[in-house]
Image (cartoon, coloured by chain):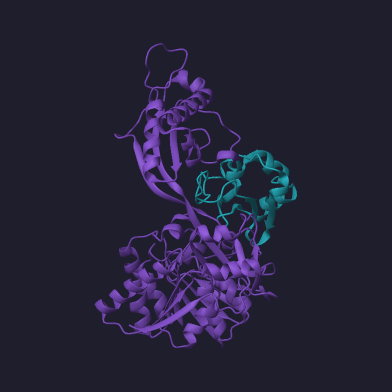
Chain colours: A purple, B cyan
Amino acid sequence: MNEIRVLSATGILGSGFREDSLKRGMALRPDFIGADSGSTDPGPYYLGSGERLFSDSAYKRDLRLILLAARAAKIPAIIGSACTAGTDGQVQLLVRIACEIAREEKLNFKLATIRSEQNKDYLKHKLREGRIRPLANAPKLDEAVIDRSAHIVGMCGIEPFVEALQNGADVVLAGRSSDTSIFSALPVMRGINPATVWHAAKILECGAACVVLRKYPDCMFATVRNDSFIIEPPNPEYRCDPASVASHNLYENSTPYELVEPSGVLNTFSAKYEALSDRAVKVSGSTFARSARYTIKLEGAELAGYQSLIIGAVRDPIILRQFDSWLEGLVRAAKDRIAAVFGADVEPQYRLDVRVFGKNAAMGPLESDTSIGHEVGVLFQVTADTQELAAGLIKSVSHIAVHYPVPEWTGLITSIAYPYSPAELHRGATYRFNMNHVVEPATPLEMFHIDYQNV
Amino acid sequence: MRKLWEVTKLIRSKNSGPFELTFDVIFKDHATYEKVRDAKLINAQWFAKTYRLQPEVVSIINYDAASAIKITIPRPAISGDVDDTDVFGGQQYGPLVDLEVP
């Protein structure tokens, strides 16, 4: 029977998995090991700055076990969305780590790297041609936005992975990739029904996330055939049931029925989920419709400024009784003081925001219960064009806030509890996601660069 | 009267990409799910009022396969932007927890 066996090492490279689970997965003779290494979840900082979510040691630990297992079994290892955002620098970092591992473990392999960062002139050209379209809730995109971006990546489909595998790559380290493409490339290349493959890939890309109770990150295993796939966790402590596997379609997706990929749309409306045992689930019945136009999703991030903060707490019931008006007066006084010290023309170079913990710090404008209790936390946040300016401005805020009066008390009051000396914290650069668009490339490969080396 | 948290396995919120926020209400048993679904207890009007939004921006999808109701809204701020409050979007489900279920 035509089938592909897939071992997903973990939901995100660097978060870990049990060594024993990987061994059990390998005993099931997978055709390849895949792992996603990225996410936009932790925010725009990683795309903007090129920094990564986990430590180099964490990436190295996970990648070492994957490479050792894959080379021992002579099967490909495929990693996508390198080191959080999948920028060229983050791919390079993962390549460096892979080379270190190869040296230390005396491994030899053909390495393919797929770079996903985008050329700004290419994107401007596509924009002028009308071949860039906005997705839901997208901000405005023009040439200035493209110019301002610190990094722009395109989310590749299966085609660059297929190209690399067909050219004999043993290990593929890719920049930004659709999570599911990492797991779909090889099965589609081997001729398995794309509908089954893409659905299996959606379940696999989060590692053990589809189990009934996920206590820690771990591996997942799937056997993918034309008419169905079987999902079963290699870890004996874990189990899947039809509801847990079906529920996974809800995760981080605006609809459980559709998954849009570069080449088409997976539809799970008619999918059937059957228990094969108390821990394995068989899934069948999804469909995959090819899109008329092939599209690549863009992700971009630009600098939003530099931040300095103060965190404090207010406990005085007299202040809390009139908290909103007290805070409003305080902010006005702080801005006046800033204008007096730095000049009126500093105004367009900064913004001052206040977060009130114990009132609406979690939900902001979505919060309808803005009542407060016996204590609130206050976070003053200055965002300015330079870190030096932010650091200067926050000092003015700090001094105003700590002595801001209420009419009931006479004399000098100290109105905020600061836990730190100095009260200020400096956060450095902060970034903003600035694109939610798709491009229509002439071919699925033209936006990506594949390089090979023998390691 | 039971509260929504008492009849669900999980109520959660999460980013669906940096520009959307999605809520999942996953019921313990299919019968209760069907009752809540058919009574349209979680509807766009109610959700919009609870979250101070316009009903037109609220999308609600019933997902029988997992006995779940999904609600998706545009994010009030882009994830991680200067005025965002919750980068992962993970702490937005609070107002759903104590909804009364017949």
Residue A260 visible here = no
Q: Position of residue A419 (x, y in %)?
A: 33, 33
At horizontal 64% and vertical 75% (from top left) the residue drawn is A294
How many labels, in total?
A: 0
Quadrant of the image for the N terminus of chain A?
Answer: bottom right
Task: Kindly indicate the quadrant of the structure image that contains residue B67.
Answer: bottom right
- A45 vs A250, left or right, is left
Residue at screen point 40% across, 59% down: A53
- A285 vs A362, left or right, is right
Q: Residue at x 29, y 34 (%)?
A: A421
Q: Relative to residue A285, is residue B15 depicted above or below?
A: above
Residue A277 image offset from top left, x and y in percent: 53, 71
Visible in this render: residue B61? Answer: yes
Q: Is residue A403 above or below residue A213?
A: above
Task: Identify the image quadrant of the C terminus of chain A.
Answer: bottom left
Q: Nearer the viewer, residue B33 or A316?
A: A316
Residue A392 image offset from top left, x and y in percent: 37, 37
